[in-house]
Amino acid sequence: MDTGDTAWVLTSAALVLLMTPGLALFYGGMVRAKSVLNMMMMSFGAMALIGVLWVLYGFSMAFGDDVGGGLLGNPFEYFGLTGLLGADNLVGTLPAMAFVAFQSVFAIIAVALISGAIADRAKFGAWMVFAGVWATVVYFPVAHWVFSFDGVVSEVGGWIAGAGAIDFAGGTAIHINAGAAGLALALVLGKRRGFGREPMRPHNLPLVMLGAGLLWFGWFGFNAGSATAANGTAAVAWVNTLAATCAAVLGWLLTEKIRDGHATSLGGASGAVAGLVAITPACSALNPVTSIVVGVIAGVLCALAVGLKYKLGYDDSLDVVGVHLVGGLWGTLAVGLFATADAPAAVDGLLYGGGLGQLWIQFYAAVVVMVFSFVVTWVIGTAIQRTMGFRIDEEDEVAGIDQVVHAESGYDWGTLTGGGGRVVGSPAKPTDARHASTGTSEVNA
């Protein structure tokens, strides 16, 4: 065991865990005021549930010995983390439990990311059922495919890892996976009432920027921590993450300025996330200059991609598809284009004389994960919708999901405006919010 490596990985795990509350703020600020608490609760609910499932069987499914040709780890091998507590159980230079901790926070945020695609219209209980099922049948197996290398934890690992695809910190397993799932759920639940006709602007841009800042901060643990050691690989990943993200902000803002005449705070925050997504799979394979190139292109691509929902008619509320799916695809393919053998991954991409081989492997891995996630998510979402119901009633959506589902409001409008009557933050019967002719519903809308 190396104490420096252990300290860095545990610190990185804490940084990545902070990203989920950061995501809650980022998503919460982007919805309308009447939905902010529900939006944030979807992230916190995922954090609570997936943390428990990871301990029980998730880690074993992701990193247990392969039981299906590289498709699945043995869910009973480390059930309840049995056999991993001893000081002599190491993963490389780390105590096994440090590795367990680090990988757990990736599982948490992968699930939470999906929630942005169905903002304003999903039942919280149905979301929690979905989160547990999706993690079990989609994320845990895909994590095994991508992150379970032969001889690291299990004797025989996943097929994507074995095929030589480079996904240093989760471009396929997390961002493409969650982005494809978000698209499937958006199609299952349908459009928000008023989509394309009514303004659905972010209600609190300072919250968005605060959330983006926390995501950016935590992402250094996400990427540099994936070296699982305090070494040169971690340092390269850190610098490449900085370079790409800064460049993506500039790319998004420039696109907005040319297209719309204004560079916005929402664009700056979204550009940062787009750059972080794109560099995630590639941060060990590029040099800092090509990281800037990848970041700029990510900012431009994702800024353009978020408008696809209006042209194609799907309602991806907070642009999970435009940022995470598109950004994840670009970053994964960028490895095959810009990888250099001088970087820690030690492979050459097409533009560095490596030919088409690595690009093909990256493309194949990305497409398989995308298709698998979309199809299985559509099946899960459809089953929940037809049984317990996934989408809230239209009148509840109009009244505000916070009041109807959680009996709370994010803002005490009565106190803020000096008005009398019922305090918005107090519990209320759903009918109070749905049928009020004045007050909370109109203000929150």
Image: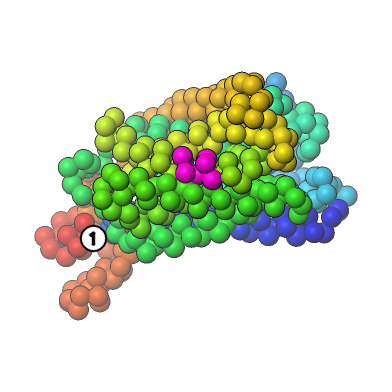
Q: Where's residue 383, x and y in %?
A: 41, 30
Within the magenta stretch, is there residue 294? yes
Residue at 30% across, 68% down: 411
The three-letter code of the residue at mark 1 reads Asn
Q: Which residue is mark 1?
A: 444
Residue 372 showing in the rendered view: no
Q: What secondary structure characterizes most of the magenta part?
A: helix
Q: Nearer the viewer, residue 302 or 246?
A: 246
Q: Left or right of 35: which side holds 336? A: right
Looking at the image, the residue that sits furthest to the bottom is: 418
Q: Nearer the viewer, residue 132 or 297?
A: 297
Looking at the image, the residue that sits furthest to the right is: 88
Q: Nearer the viewer, residue 307 or 261?
A: 261
Q: Where's residue 96, x and y in %?
A: 78, 48
Residue at 61% across, 39% down: 282
Within the magenta stretch, is there residue 179? no
- For label 1, the SS is helix
Q: For residue 168, what is the image quadrant? A: top right
Q: For residue 432, what is the image quadrant? A: bottom left
Q: Where's residue 355, x and y in %?
A: 64, 21
Q: Read off the magenta span.
A: 292-298
